[in-house]
Each structure stands twice: as C-alpha cells, then as structure tokens.
Image (cartoon, rainbow, N blue to C red):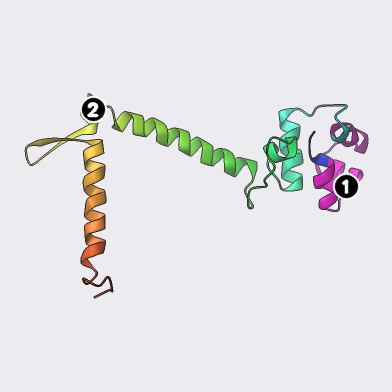
Amino acid sequence: MNKIADTRKKKGLTLKELGAMVNLGSNTISRYETGKREPKLETWQKLADALDVSVPYLTGLTDSVPDGLTFDEIQAVIDDEIAMIGLIDKLNDHSNPVTNAEINGRRKTAYDLKNTFEFQRIKKAADGRTSDGSNK
C-alpha cells in the first residue's frame, strides 16, 4: 500500500490542496491513495516533491524518509556511485596501459598508486604527532 494519504495528512494537507500542488483533481488523488488508480512515474515524482519525500518512500518500497534529500538528489548520488564503480573497474584493469604508471623504473598499477598515496597521507598525519599521540 502506498503512503500518499498518510504523508498528506502528516503534512496537514487536504485532497484538494495536494491536488492543486500537482495539478490534479482531488478525486484523482483519492483514487491514488486508495489504490484504485496507479500514478505514472512522472506523477509519483510530482507527488513526492510536493510532499517533500522520496518516490520509494511514497510508493511504500521503503519505510525511511531520507534526511532532506529529494528524488533528484538521491538519483544524482546513485548516478555518481555507478560512474565511480565504472572508473574503479577501469583503474583496476591491470592490462590497460592508461591505468599503469612507471615510477622509479617500476611498473605501478592504479591500485598500487592508490595505496602509495594513502600510505603517504597516513604517514604525514602521524608525523604531525609525538610518540604519546599528542600534536607537536
């Protein structure tokens, strides 16, 4: 069951007010709430935006409301993660010459370079501390 009615009521909106926000009649909103009619994806997005929740929450696919994130912001995060996974796959391709580098005559993969940079970052942080762990 979707959460249109519960969310609308929690926001203190009437059927008519929500309908006006998304350019739909109160009868249509009522049918969506009771499950007699199913909104198109575009309408789900309009309803979610108007009610300031995510589409998955409104459709009942998730019970949690993200902290202030809109659907577009969530989608942007997902898109970034997918792009990052693709980049990591390319960087981990040891046969790809673009992802390999030669440092001091030794062949280094992107994985090796990442570990080297991470080690240097940790070492710099440690160098800024005394043996008892306090800052110099």
Q: What's the amino acid at mark 1? A: Glu
Which image quadrant for residue 133?
Answer: bottom left
Q: Is residue 85 left or right of residue 124?
A: right
Q: Quadrant of the C terminus?
A: bottom left
Look at the image and give the residue range highlighted in magenta: 5-32
Q: Is residue 114 left or right of residue 68?
A: left
Which image quadrant for residue 134?
Answer: bottom left
The secondary element bearing badge 2 is classed as loop
Q: What's the amino acid at mark 2? A: His
Q: Is residue 122 above or below residue 85?
A: below
Q: Which residue in the rendered view is the most extreme toward the right?
A: 27
**Viewer-proximal residue among 63 and 92:** 63
Residue at which label 1 appears: 17
Asked if residue 1 is among those painted magenta in the image, a careful observer would answer no
The main secondary structure of the magenta stretch is: helix
* Residue 85 percent coordinates (x, y): 41, 33
Q: Which residue in the rendered view is the most extreme toward the top?
A: 95
Q: How many angstroms separate mark 2 from mark 1 (CA)?
A: 58 Å
Residue at horizontal 61%, vertical 41%? 72
